[in-house]
Image (cartoon, rainbow, N blue to C red):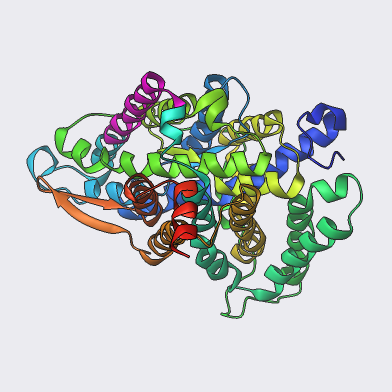
Amino acid sequence: MNENGIYNARELGMPKMLLLGLQHMFAMFGATILVPILVNSFFHGEGLSIQVTLFCAGIGTLLFHLLTKFQVPAFLGSSFAFLGGFATVAELKTGIFANMSYGEKLPYACGGVLVAGLLYLALALIIRMVGIARVMKFLPPVVTSPIVVCIGLGLAPVAIGSASTNWTLAGIAIATIVIFLIWGKGMLRIIPILLAIIVSYCIALALHAIGVTNPDGSAILNFGAVAKAPLVGVPEFFICKFDVTAILAMAPIALASMMEHIGDMSAISATCKRNYIEKPGLHLSLLGDGLATSFSALIGGPANTTYGENTSVLALSRVYDPQVVRLAAVYAVALSFLPKVAALISSMPASIIGGISFILYGMIAAVGMRNLIENKVDLTIPRNLVIIAVVMVCGLGFTKGLTFTVAGTSITLTSLALASIVGILLNAFLPGEEDELIQRIKNQD
């Protein structure tokens, strides 16, 4: 393997490319289907469809790749940022919502998501007009690198929570990744996540067969949903609807998700050692993310967002070819028409997902730290220390986000969005550039 990574996976051959795409599909699967599961709880079983969600993730990813000129190896899965908005719309009981069932409210929530996606286009247009160079003055490594660290460390409790359901299986998954990543040869070193899934799932099957349970007494595996699911089925699409109240509950969340997008693009750029923010351009990636979100909402799906899990797979495999990610998107679309297969994958124990995430999320944070080092960000300069310190505390400290009310509408900024906004503002308004500060400190000495 080239020490800088592989940018053209075709040199590995089609069979290996197919396996790499499968690895990306497994990486995104758990989080992507978790969003409709959570939304269903808000709408009392009348919420989003897992099949529609998988279809929208796959098509949204392909649309994103088309609009970014097939250059950015990003996967777009379900966004968690809009969960609060879905919960708000589900409980609306005034105006036209007074006598609606939960299922009747859902299209209006999706209508609000569609409008939020269109707001991405406004920011993309601004960036296109003023130029990426001016925009990047507000997004130097001293701002983006700690945001990337926060993306990884902010997800750490999720990994621990899932892994703690059965530390034995989680430990097997972690150990498998480490063994193949460190000592594996050739292709085995490139697909450690897929191998960890296969090994740990086989062991889970064996333990389940002999009657072993999780520490809390629950079954390691549950195939109830697999038995009920049909082999083939068309996703239950519906067209979204619009109402000002629902739009006001959903659209402002775009501010947070756009900041997350910028952080994710920085992480992908740092991982692949390519500046995708400049080429093909942040305006195109925002355009792709926004249109993917609007398309998903139009046909009854959740908002989409670039996935850190898949960025971690890029870092682990060191295969940066977008073609591999597009294969994962094709798999997701195919699964949306195969409910039984999707249910079988969903039967994977949470502990295995947690063990894999244990490595993946830490890898994101490590990429952020590497980016600080490679860009030679001087941590002896007070200005840099202040920016990094405040970004890190905001990104990791506001675990429930920051909620405030504007014109009667409750808006929540996620911790990551808040960290992004604060970092950009501090970089813009703290006096002096780095070189000027260095000179000032020397003069004072």
Q: Going 79% across and 40% down the picture, which residue do you hit? A: 4
Query: Which x, y percent locates residue 385?
Result: 46, 61
Whether residue 335 can be seen here? yes
Q: Is residue 389 above or below residue 132?
A: below
Asked if the magenta segment contains residue 120, the reply would be yes
Determine the residue located farthest toward the left in the rendered image. Answer: 95
Q: Is residue 184 above or below residue 268?
A: below
Q: Could you tell whether 147 is left or right of 14 in the image?
A: left
Whether residue 236 can be seen here? no
Viewer-closest of 280 and 305: 280
Viewer-closest of 426 and 410: 426
Asked if the magenta segment contains residue 146, the reply would be no
Query: Which x, y percent locates residue 315?
Result: 70, 47
Q: Could you tell whether 145 is left or right of 256 in the image?
A: right
Q: Going 45% across and 31% down the picture, which residue do you hit? A: 289
Q: Going 87% across and 40% down the picture, which residue do you hit? A: 1
Q: Is residue 312 above or below residue 352?
A: above
Q: Which residues are magenta?
A: 111-132
Query: Which x, y percent locates residue 232?
Result: 60, 33
Query: Which x, y percent locates residue 233?
Result: 54, 33
Viewer-closest of 44 and 279: 279
What predominant SS class does the magenta segment belong to?
A: helix
Number of numbered discs visible in the structure rendering: 0
Viewer-closest of 93 and 328: 328
